[in-house]
Image (cartoon, rainbow, N blue to C red):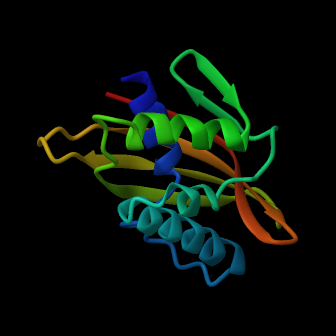
Amino acid sequence: MRDLVFLVGVIATLAVVGIGQDSGEAGPVAIRKVIEEQQAAWNRQNLEGFMAGYWNSPELTFFSGAHESKGWQAALDRYKKSYQGAGHEMGKLEFANLRIEMLGTNAAFVRGEFHLTMSDGQTPRGLFTLVFRKFPEGWKIVHDHSAGE
């Protein structure tokens, strides 16, 4: 379950169903696009596409429960094991109540809910917070903190 919460939290980072913010600023629009692309990739069962929204660095961090993990490749490996390994599925990911708060021109804080619908009817869900940073190649998630049931 911890892997599921972690994965969903990371994923949660990902899709948009109600950002409800139209500030006209380039930052929120670009961040929303990253999240939408992550959600779409997850729902196509494309973990590499999903992970494209994260900073590809060993310094990328994830918090879930009392556990901290680091690194882009380690996160991809965990997702593959938890969602594409034998007897596992990715389900359908949806995000709700997304709120983007700019912390400057190169940083943003995103809050929201994640909902994962599995083929057996289970619906893991929870809350997440993400920290985005603007890099030359665009906006990337540098930290993901997720908690779910």
Is residue 21 shown left or right of residue 72?
A: left
- Residue 147 appears in view: no
Q: Residue at x 66, y 27 (%)?
A: 69
- Residue 56 appears in view: yes
Residue 80: x and y, percent?
Answer: 49, 42
Is residue 140 shown left or right of residue 135?
A: left
Q: Is residue 105 above or below residue 109?
A: below
In the rendered image, the quadrant that contains the C terminus is top left
Q: Residue at x 53, y 52 (%)?
A: 13
Is residue 52 shown left or right of residue 6?
A: right
Q: Residue at x 80, y 64 (%)?
A: 134
Q: Is residue 34 above or below residue 110?
A: below
Quarter occupied by residue 136:
bottom right
In the rendered image, the quadrant that contains the N terminus is top left
Residue 55: x and y, percent?
Answer: 74, 53
Nearer to the camera, 40 or 127? 40
Residue 49: x and y, percent?
Answer: 56, 64
Farthest residue toward the front?
A: 86
Residue 35: x and y, percent?
Answer: 53, 64
